[in-house]
C-alpha cells in the first residue's frame, strides 16, 4: 500500500486511472523560491503525449495541466505543489470486451490477484497514462535541477532491433533526438527503425526498445550509501516503469565479461574543476567513464549514463489465448489505440524519473556535512 | 544521509566499517513469534565469509554473530533484533599506503568529495565487508519467508567470461551450486572458469561476473504500484551492491529486441493453484515466464528470476595511475587480500537482499485489502 | 520539506493555500474493496465549513469535493484517492493591508524567516483552511474504521472559560454535540459559553477552548513501540493543528500530582471480550481508565480518551502593535472574517486526524505477528 | 512494526530488552566531520543511570557505552554510528513471580494482546531501560546541536505534588538542577518534595511528576508544516516516553481559558538579531513568549518551552488486584528495584528526545530554500 509516493525529501505522490476523471501529482518538498511556470510542465507533458505519429497510439489529449497550489506570484512557496490534468478523451467502452479477460503480458491478472477486482478501462492505474503524474512532478524537479545547471537528456537507443548511435558516434546528433518520431539520436537509424515498426504495425505486432539517458553537471558525491546509492535509486525509478525489464549503468552487463585492468576508471588531476569540495579534497576528472558516472553508489563528476530496456508493448492486435474471469480458457482480440514501441514516449518519462531521483539526492546531499 | 536503513515495514539498519570494531544490523519490524536461532544467521554469514579458497580473498574471520535483543526463549518478540559481529582480523596497516591515494574504480574519491575525509582502511564503509550486516539481516528475513514456504536461491551464472548453465539446461544442478568455489550451477563450467580466474590471479588482474537468482512460491500480487513494484524494489536492492552494474528480469535486455507476439506470457487455467485469491479471482499459470515472474510490478505466481552483472573487482595487483590527496598524479600498487571475482561471495548477499525486499513486500501485501 | 505527508501505510498528502485555486488531498494506501461514497466526504467537509453561525467566521463556501481517482464502481481500487475542492469564495483583497505586516500570534514572520516570502492572502498554507485536506483524507480513514466498527467522536469540552460536561456527567448528551453551535456536550454549558463568546465578539476579542475526543472499539495492542506509540502518534497529529498548545491522555496533567495506588488501572477478568487474541492471551477489562485507553503506548481495549487545548484565535479585531516588512514598529488592524473560538470547527478536524492515525496503526497492526 | 526507528534525516534506531544481553542504538544520518567523543555519550548515560539515590531505583549499572562504527580518528564519518551498552546487572529471577501476572498500569497485557507473548523480565522492551538507546542517540544529536550553539536543558518542575520554581522565579537556579536528587530548579522545593517522596516510599507508593524543558538559540523557522511542525514532532517524542500523559507548549492548557488580546505574542523590531534570514526578512524579537517559542509549528527565535506530565511509577510495592495468564482474578505483590518518581531520570531522556527532534529539523531546514 502507499506505493504511489516517491522520494524522501523531494517527494512526489501521483494519482489517476487511465479513464478516471483526472491524473496528476502532489510534489511535497520542492524548495521555496523557485521560479516555476505552467509552461515548464506543459512542455514535458506534451512530449509525453500520444498522437505525435510514429509508433505511438493515436489517442490524443491536450493534457492541459493546472497548478492548484504551492506557487505564488510565480515562485514556489515551500508548500505542496499539486498539478491536475483532466482525462478528456476517455472512451471506456473501447474496453468493454476486456472486462472479463486477462490480457497476456499485462498486469490484469496480478492486479486482481492482489486487490480482488480492477478498473479494466485501459488498464486503470496500470496504464501508461499513469506516467502523466510522473512527468508533471519530474518537470518541477527539472526546473529545480536547471537552477543548478544540471541537465538530463534521454533518447531511444534501440528500437525494432535497430541500434541507434550514441554520444561519441559520428552519426549521433543531440538536436536530432526531438526531430524524429522515435526520438533516436541518428536520422538514418530512426528511418530504418520506423520502417521496421511500420511492418510490425501491419502485422498487428509490437516492438521492444531501449532508452538511454545522460545527466550532466552532477556534483560529485551524490548518492547515500549504502542503500540509497545513486544507481540504486535510479534503478528503482527505472524498473518502476511499466515495461522496463533491465537497467544498466556505464559498461552495464558487459562489465561481467571484463577485467579490472580494462574497466577501472582512473582519476586524473583536474585542478579547479570542482572548486567547492569539502576538506580540501582535490578535483579529479576520469580517463574513462566505464562506471557510467557512479562509483560506490556516488556520482564521480562524470556524466551519469544508463540504459533501460523495455519489452514490446503487450497490447498487440493479434488473436491471443488467455483466461477469463471464470477461469476458463478464452480468446482475446485487443482493439483500440495502442503504441507499438514505447521508446519515444518513454524518453520524457525516463527523464522525469531521473529528475525526481536527482532532486531528492541533491537535497539529501545538503545534509552530508556538519 | 541515513542511507543505511532499508525497508518500509521489515526494516534493516546496517552498520560497520571494514576495520572498525564491529559490523552488524538492527532489524526492526520482524513479526513476533518467529522461531529464530543463531545458527540461521551463522550459516549465511559463513557462506559470505572470505577464505573459502577459489576467487575470494584469503582474509579469514570467524564472523561469529551475537543476537543482542529482540529474541526471547527462541522466538522473536516483535521488538528490534540487533546482531553484532566483531571485526577480528583487522590489519589496518595493510592500508597505510592507500591513505593518500584514490584507488581507481573505488569510491575513495567520490566518498571524500562528499564527506571531506574517509576511513581509508580497507575501504571503510564502502568495503565489501559492509555486506555482512545485510547478510545477517537477510538471514532473519529468510527465516520469516521460510515460514511461508518461500525459497530464494542464487548462483554465479557467469564468471571470467564463461557462462554457466541455468535452470532448464541439462548441465545445471541445484546441488552443485554450493559444491564449487565459484557457486556456479554446473561442474564443468565452474572448472573452466576457475582456470581462467587462476590465470587472472597470476596476472594480478580481476574478473567480472553475473549472479542469477530465483525466488519460488511467491504469492501473486506481491509489489506496490507504482513506485514500490516488486522489480523496482529488487532493482534498487541489487544496484545498492558495491560492484553491480546491471540488473535484468526474465528476458532482460533481450526484450528490447523482441516482439509482443513472441514475448507475451499467456495465462492458462490452473484451478486450485492459488486457493485464497480475493474476490473469487481464478487461478492461472503462465505458458512462458519471459517476464521473470513480474508483470506491472506485481508477482505473477511464476518464479521471480533476475540476473545481476558485477564489474571486475577494482583492487587489482597491477601498477595503476591515479591522483593523490594533494591532487597530483601518482602511481598506486595495491597489496593485501582481495577477491578476484565477486561472484561466489555475492551469491549470499544477493539472496539476503532479495529476502529483505520480499519480507517487506509480504508485510505490505497484508494491507492490500479491507 | 515534505511535511505535508502523513502516515506510514495509510498515507495522506494534503495541499492548498487559503486563497489559491484549490485544496485537497491524496490518500495513498487505503485498502482496496472499501465502499466509498462522495457523501461520506461531503458530510465531514460540511461540518468543518465556516458559516454555521456561532463563533465561526462568516466566510461560507460550498466546499464541494470531487473524487479524482482511486474509486471504481463505488469501491476503492487500492490506488491513490485524490480529492479536490475548489476554493470558491476567495477575497484576497481583504488581505492587502496585511501584506507587509506580521500578525501577532500568527506564523507570518516564522514562515518568512524560513522561506523568505509568503502567500499573505489569508495565511496561505498556514490558514485554517489547510485543514480541509485533512478532513477529506480523514473522512476516508473513517469509512475504513467504520467497517471495523471503530467510532470516533469529538466535542468542545471547554470554551470561553466555561467547562462543558463530559461523558459520565449527568448533563452530557452525545446527541447534543451537533445540536449547538459550539459542539459542546451539554445544552446549558453551550448557551453559557455562547453568551461569553458574544461578549468577546463585541470586544473584538477571541477565546481559547478545549476539544475532547473518544475513540471506541479499538482492538487492544494498537500502537508501535517505542516511537510510534498510539499516544505519540495522536499527540503529533493534534499538535500539528494550527492553534493547539497541549494534549492530555486520560488523567492527563493531573497524573503528575497523583500516586500509583490511586492512578493504576487494574485489569479484571473479561472472558470472551476480545475473542481473537493471539497466543491464547485472556481477555481483560479495566476497573478504571485513568490511562485514557493507552498503556505503554498500546491500546488497552478501553476507550481512547484525550483532550486538546487550543489557544484563542490570533486574528482579533483590536489594534495591535507589530513589525512591518521593513523591520519597523507598526500598527495592525485586522479586518475580514475570522472565527472567535476554534472549538466547533476543530471538532471534525480532531476526529479526522484521529481517524488517520488509527487507520495507519490498524494496518501496521496487521504486521505484528508471523 | 518497525516503531523503534525515529527521525527522517537524523535517524535513530534503538534496541534492547531490559534483561537481554545489551541495549543501544544506531544513528544513521549524523553529518560527517563532527568531533565525537565517547565521553559525550558516557556523560548523558550516567545522568540517566539509576542508583543516584533519591527517588530512583537502586539497580546500578555502569552502562559503559562502546562506539562500534561511524567514527574515525575522533570524527563522524557520515556512516551509521552504532553504540552498544551491555546489560550487566540482570537479575531476571527477580521477575519470576510476574511471569503469569499482568501488572496494573503496565504494558504487560496490551503487549501480549498484540504479540501473543512477552519478555516478562523487568518489562522487556517496555522497561524504562529502553530509554538507554534514546539517551545514547540523543547524546550524539546534542553534540551536533552544540556545534550550532543550541542548548537544551530540562528539569523536574513538579514532583510529589510540589511545584518547583521555573526560569524567572527568584528561587530558580539553573545550577541547582544537577545538584539535588530530583533535578528540580530550586533547593527548597526539592527538599520539600523529597520529604513527600520518602513518605511515599515508606507507604510502598509512587508519585507523578512534571518535567519542563527549554531549548535555546534555535534558528527561526524550524519545523515542517503541516504535519512535521516543531511542536508536533516534540509532542510525539514526549508521548513516546513510557509514563508521559500530557505535553504542553508555552501557556499550554491554560491557553484554552485565555483571550487573544492577552495571549497574542507581539513581534518587536530587533535589527541584526538573526543576520542570515532569507529574502531580506527583518529580525524580530517577541514581547512575550506565551507560544512557547513556536507559532504555526515553526520556531519563533524565542526559547522553545514545554512541559511533560508523567504519571506515577506503576510498580508500587502494595498488594494489587489483577488477572493472571489464565484469565483469572489474582493478587500481585511487586518486589525488586523500582523508581518512585520518574522525574530526575526522565530529565536526560526528555533532553535526548528533544535533541533528536531538533537535529532532524535542523537538517530538514537545510532543504527549505532553492
Image: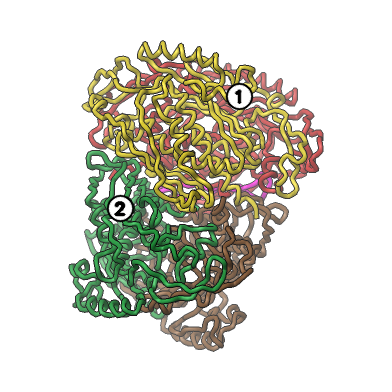
Chain colours: A green, B brown, C yellow, D red
D108 up-or-down from D262: above or below: below
Residue count near mark 1 (Cα–Cα under 10 Å), binned few <14, some 14–19, many ≥20: many
Tell me the quadrant of the picture where the C terminus of chain C can be found.
Answer: bottom right
Q: Is residue D216 left or right of residue A85?
A: right
**Residue B358 as seen in the image, left or right of residue A84:** right
Magenta highlight range: D11-34
Instruction: Give the Cα separation between the discs numbered 2 and 1.
Output: 49 Å
In the displayed structure, does residue C54 sit left or right of residue B85? left
Q: Residue at x 28, y 34 (%)?
A: C119
Tell me residue A333's x, y (percent). 42, 72
Could one spot residue A66 in this view of the protein? Answer: yes
Of circles 2 and 1, the one toward us is 2
> Chain ID for label 1?
C
Q: Measuring 41% from the left and 29% from the top, which residue is drawn there? A: C49
In this rendering, do the residues under marks 2 and 1 share a single chain?
A: no
- Closer to us: B357 or B76: B357
SS category of the residue bearing label 2: helix
Q: Mark 1 — residue?
A: C256
| Residue C299 in which image quadrant | top right
**Observer able to see residue B97:** no
Q: Which residue is mark 2?
A: A141
Residue C43 located within the stretch drawn in magenta: no
Amino acid at each position: 500500500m502507499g506505493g504511489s509516493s516517491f522520494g524522501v525529501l523531494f517527494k512526489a505522490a501521483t494519482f489517476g486511472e487511465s479513464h478516471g476523471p483526472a491524473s496528476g501529482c502532489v510534489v511535497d518538498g520542492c524548495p521555496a523560491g523557485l521560479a516555476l511556470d505552467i509552461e515548464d510542465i506543459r512542455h514535458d507533458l506534451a512530449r509525453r503525449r500520444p498522437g505525435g505519429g510514429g509508433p505511438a497510439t493515436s489517442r490524443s489529449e491536450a493534457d492541459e495541466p493546472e497548478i492548484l497550489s504551492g506557487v505564488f506570484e510565480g515562485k514556489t512557496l515551500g508548500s505542496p505543489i499539486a498539478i491536475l490534468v483532466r482525462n478528456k478523451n476517455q472512451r471506456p467502452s473501447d474496453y468493454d470486451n476486456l472486462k472479463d479477460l486477462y490480457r497476456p503480458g499485462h498486469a490484469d491478472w496480478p492486479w486482481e490477484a492482489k486487490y480482488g477486482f480492477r478498473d479494466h478501462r485501459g488498464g486503470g492505474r496500470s496504464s501508461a497514462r499513469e506516467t502523466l503524474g510522473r512527468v508533471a512532478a519530474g518537470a518541477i524537479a527539472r526546473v529545480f535541477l536547471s537552477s543548478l545547471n544540471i541537465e538530463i537528456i534521454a533518447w531511444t537507443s534501440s528500437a525494432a532491433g535497430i541500434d541507434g548511435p550514441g554520444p561519441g558516434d559520428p552519426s549521433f546528433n543531440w538536436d536530432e533526438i526531438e526531430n524524429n518520431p522515435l526520438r533516436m539520436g541518428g536520422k538514418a537509424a530512426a528511418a530504418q527503425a520506423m520502417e521496421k515498426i511500420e511492418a510490425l504495425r501491419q502485422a498487428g505486432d509490437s516492438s521492444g526498445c531501449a532508452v538511454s539517458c545522460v545527466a550532466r553537471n552532477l556534483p560529485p558525491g551524490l548518492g547515500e550509501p549504502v542503500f540509497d546509492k545513486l544507481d540504486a535509486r535510479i534503478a528503482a525509478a527505472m524498473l518502476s516503469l511499466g515495461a522496463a525489464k533491465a537497467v544498466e549503468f556505464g559498461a552495464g552487463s558487459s562489465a561481467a565479461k571484463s577485467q579490472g585492468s580494462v574497466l577501472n576508471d582512473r582519476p586524473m588531476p583536474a585542478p579547479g574543476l570542482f572548486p567547492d569540495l569539502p576538506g580540501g579534497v582535490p578535483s579529479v576528472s576520469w580517463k574513462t567513464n566505464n562506471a557510467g558516472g557512479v562509483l560506490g553508489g556516488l556520482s564521480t563528476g562524470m556524466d551519469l549514463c544508463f540504459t533501460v530496456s523495455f519489452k514490446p508493448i503487450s497490447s498487440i492486435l493479434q488473436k491471443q489465448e488467455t483466461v477469463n474471469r471464470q477461469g476458463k480458457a478464452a480468446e482475446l482480440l485487443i482493439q483500440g489505440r495502442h503504441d507499438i514501441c514505447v521508446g519515444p514516449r518513454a524518453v520524457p518519462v525516463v527523464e522525469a524519473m531521473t529528475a525526481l531521483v536527482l532532486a531528492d539526492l541533491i537535497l539529501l546531499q545538503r545534509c552530508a556535512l556538519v
